[in-house]
Amino acid sequence: MSKLQIGLAIAGGLVLAALVAHGAWVTRRNQPRLAEPEPRPVEPQGLGELALDPSDPVAARVDEDALLLPPALERKPLMDSLIDVIASIELEQPVAGEAVLAHMPATRRVGSKPFAIEGLEQESGQWEPPQAGRRYSALQAGVQLANRAGALNEIEYSEFVVKTQALADAVGGTPEVPDMLDAVARARELDGFAGEHDAQLNITLRARHTAWSAGYVQQNAARLGFVAGVLPGRMVLPASTAGQLPLLGLHYDAQAALAEDPALTAIREVTLSLEVPQVPRSEQPYARLREAAARLAEVMDGQLTDDNGQPLTAAAMDLIGAELENLYDRLDARELSAGSALARRLFS
């Protein structure tokens, strides 16, 4: 073999080696980032004191419903004329809770609106949901004026009247039902207010270069205190007080979350969300949303954008915060403060 042939063979070998190395580098670069092994528990880093350790595999399976269970079950909020139509039912004589429960409607909804019955407990003089072993000197039925499905309409109101009358007849009572036109007008007004003040803030985190595996997303979110939610591809940041709704949500591709091998998934964006009317202002949810988004962007090499894919600057985030404070003020003025029982019912 001549020197020229040997030189060409060496050069060809070097080129081939370079191509193989480049291909391996490209393949490695395009592989999603994987979760790192964690030999010991990781404490949440400043996003609120939590009773759950997010690195614990048992705690990580806690869903949103479980997060709502305080040491003592939260009492169902009473009906309120601010967001409910209430019909009083005068009784001929006190009635046992068992009798009321036996004649309750099969469903607790009227169309798309929640329907409820309450009794005036004879001994305590307090309104409460009917319970066995109690006696009630009066009853009242109510239907919610509006929710995210819209305002109470005439058909729903008529169904409410029918259900109320049926219960009254069964327990020997006489109902006094508000005027339908007045109730429907109130419902439309409340629905208009709710529509103008129902805000959900979303911040999208997009991968700048390398995609993320589902495990990588879960690991970095867990380090900030997020735990698994009810639905695949959803994590939540629990409230600091037991029994309250989660403060923030984190969403990513549900199919990636359900994959048999999370390491083989490739996620290029996640969304952080805040249901403004559902979370108390005192929890400073927007500040915590910004903090969580900034931390994830830093450690995951991502860019923060709005729903339209436009980069979110600090100035834009400050403007959103100022508008949010005005929204909180308007909710407070209407006695529907964010995170209150009435706000949670109305904006649901």
Image: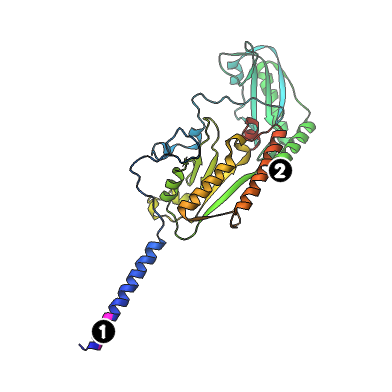
Answer yes or no: is residue 122 visible. Answer: yes
Seen from the viewer's position, the closer of residues 245 and 166 is: 245
Seen from the viewer's position, the closer of residues 196 and 40 is: 40
* SS for dot 1: helix
Residue holding disc 1: 7
Label 1 Cα crowd, 10 Å radius (few <14 / some 14-19 / many 20+) = few
Rendering coords of residue 161 (x, y %): 72, 28
In this picture, residue 9 sits left or right of residue 301? left
In this picture, residue 104 sits left or right of residue 35? right
Q: Which residues are magenta?
A: 4-10
Residue 48 to residue 128: above or below: below
Q: Which mark is residue 22?
A: none
Assign the magenta stretch its main secondary structure: helix
Residue holding disc 2: 196
Q: Amino acid at mark 2?
A: Glu
Seen from the viewer's position, the closer of residues 253 and 335 is: 335
Quadrant location of the N terminus in the rendered image: bottom left
Does the segment drawn in magenta span residue 89? Answer: no
Rendering coords of residue 243 (x, y %): 53, 30
The quadrant holding residue 31 is bottom left
Q: Nearer the viewer, mark 2 or mark 1?
A: 1
Residue 256 to residue 136: above or below: below
Q: Amino acid at mark 1?
A: Gly
Count of numbered marks: 2
